[in-house]
Image (cartoon, coloured by chain):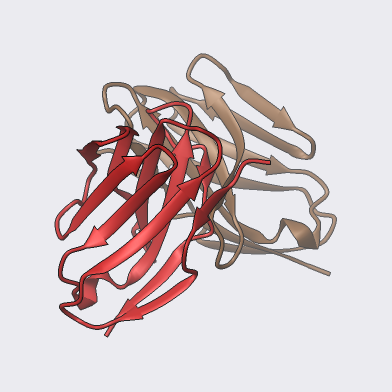
Amino acid sequence: DVKVTQSSRYLVKRTGEKVFLECVQDMDHENMFWYRQDPGLGLRLIYFSYDVKMKEKGDIPEGYSVSREKKERFSLILESASTNQTSMYLCASSIDRRFPQHFGDGTRLSIL
Amino acid sequence: KQEVTQIPAALSVPEGENLVLNCSFTDSAIYNLQWFRQDPGKGLTSLLLIQSSQREQTSGRLNASLDKSSGRSTLYIAASQPGDSATYLCALLYTGTASKLTFGTGTRLQVTL
């Protein structure tokens, strides 16, 4: 069965910290995505990657960066966490680079 | 700006009822439309995908329809069960916007005993 694993279900960090969210997929997919989900706003794409070391900005990349050093792993980095980055973060992978197919269970991140 | 609307935001029905969830969109230049299910505190699970050229897709008790001319998709759930309780989201892939699905905000469904 396909699996997208996010390293933390819940995470609490402080303002100004550098935060790493990790995502691993076991399906050998080339395409991986990071979304954030907020009440009333739905899911919004932060970044996606269609190959190792390749990345493209989504709709809301400000304040975030990503890393894709290996095909199976896609990391989201909050360079200097702020309270408005408190959210649910969802990682996904796909065969098709146009849309995500398999999602992880999410990381609920709180910035204090 | 493409907008995807799901009304109502929440719905409660008794077990056994047939129900319809709605998804409306303003731009009909779509490539495909997906319906997802999200359980509390979990990620999304893809339920059905309808290509632009199709009118409907079926999987078990679920049937999704697409009417581009009216800017509407519906998800029909037959003989609802408590296990169907979840949030249902529709998402559209528009032509010309590579790799960017536009999600609705979802309908939270509760099926009561």
Picture residue at 15% right of the left edge, 60% below the top: A63
Picture residue at 47% right of the left edge, 32% below the top: A29
Front residue (pair B14, A35): A35
Count the marks: how many?
0
Quarter where residue B38 is shown: bottom right
Using residue A63 as the reference point, say whether residue B113 is left or right of it: right
Front residue (pair B16, B35): B35
Residue B97 horizontal/vertical position (percent) = 27, 28
Using residue A28 as the reference point, say whether residue A44 is left or right of it: left
Using residue A112 as the reference point, say whether residue B16 is left or right of it: right
Residue A30 horizontal/vertical position (percent) = 41, 30
Res B50 visible: yes
Res A43 visible: no
Front residue (pair A81, B10): A81
Picture residue at 59% right of the left edge, 66% below the top: B40
Picture residue at 49% right of the left edge, 69% below the top: A9
Quadrant of the image containing the C terminus of chain B: bottom right
Residue A41 horizontal/vertical position (percent) = 34, 59
Is B85 situated above or below B70? below
Using residue B43 as the reference point, say whether residue A63 is left or right of it: left
Quadrant of the image containing the N terminus of chain B: top left
Is A106 situated above or below B57? below
Residue B15 horizontal/vertical position (percent) = 82, 61
Q: In brown, which chain?
A: B
Q: Colour of chain A?
A: red
